[in-house]
Amino acid sequence: MRIAVFGAGGRAGRAITAEAVLRGHEVSALVRRVPAHADLSSPAVTVARADVTDPDEVARAVEGCAAVVSAVTPASSPEELARMDPDPGYFGRAAAALLAARPPRLVVIGLFATLERPGGGLVLDDPASFPPPLRPFALSHLAGVRRLQAAGAGVDWAVLTPTAAQLSYPDLAAAVLEEIERPAVHRAVAAVA
């Protein structure tokens, strides 16, 4: 099976790419800057540039793939996110471009701040649970989730969202590959612990 991984150069994307190869899949590792991620290349991995918010680039990049994973983020750490001015439409545009490509299976890595709290409301609304400086980033993530939820039945998508508990990148990658190989979450958000 060929799997496209957007954000393959990041920590989650690298783990997902490695797990896919370990399980015998071929991977289109999609990144913003190919020279910075040439180390990903192998006989089972093709590294290519693609902007997850550009519908034409996404459509070309995922052609022939049985599944698509979005593990994108505009920053590499919470500290970097707190310093930057996040684009509120980034994850919404990414979701729209991914949906427009109509992949057979789409798995998106979510953000725990967008999960519902046991007492109601979202984690991002509780300053004791989620740092207020990161709220704009969380709202951008939430816009992407809302875009997927509004899509209807055209694409079989799942948002896998790590909880606040420590989840290793290899464990997240294993959960993603399980969802690709044996889908259990359909057009829904699921917490992964």
Image (spheres, grey):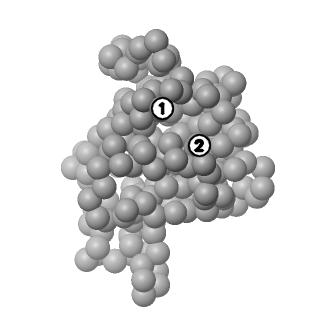
Q: What is the tally of numbered marks visible in this picture? A: 2
User: Label 2: few (<14), some or many (≥20) within 10 Å?
Assistant: few
Report the Cα–Cα distance between label 2 and label 1. Answer: 10 Å
Amino acid marked by disc 1: Arg
Numbered disc 2: secondary structure: helix
- Residue 137 seen in the figure: yes
Task: Find residue 187 and report its horizontal and vertical position in percent.
Answer: 66, 58
Write down the residue under mark 1: 23
Are circles 2 and 1 on residues that touch, CB within 8 Å? yes
- Relative to 86, 26 lies left or right: right
- In depth, the one of 99 and 87 nearer the eye is 99
User: Label 1: few (<14), some or many (≥20) within 10 Å?
Assistant: few
- Relative to 166, 98 lies left or right: right
The residue sitting at 42% across, 35% down in the picture is 19
Q: Earlier in the sequence, mark 2 or mark 1?
A: 1
- In depth, the one of 60 and 189 nearer the eye is 189
The residue sitting at 72% across, 48% down in the picture is 155
Given the current orientation, which residue lies at the most extreme bottom position? 119
Task: Find residue 174 and report its horizontal and vertical position in percent.
Answer: 42, 45
Task: Find residue 146 and report its horizontal and vertical position in percent.
Answer: 60, 61
- In depth, the one of 88 and 16 nearer the eye is 16
Write down the residue under mark 2: 181
Mark drawn on residue 183: none
Looking at the figure, which quarter contains the C terminus? Answer: bottom left
Amino acid marked by disc 2: Glu
- In depth, the one of 181 and 94 nearer the eye is 181
- Relative to 116, 66 lies left or right: right
Task: Find residue 15 and report its horizontal and vertical position in percent.
Answer: 36, 36
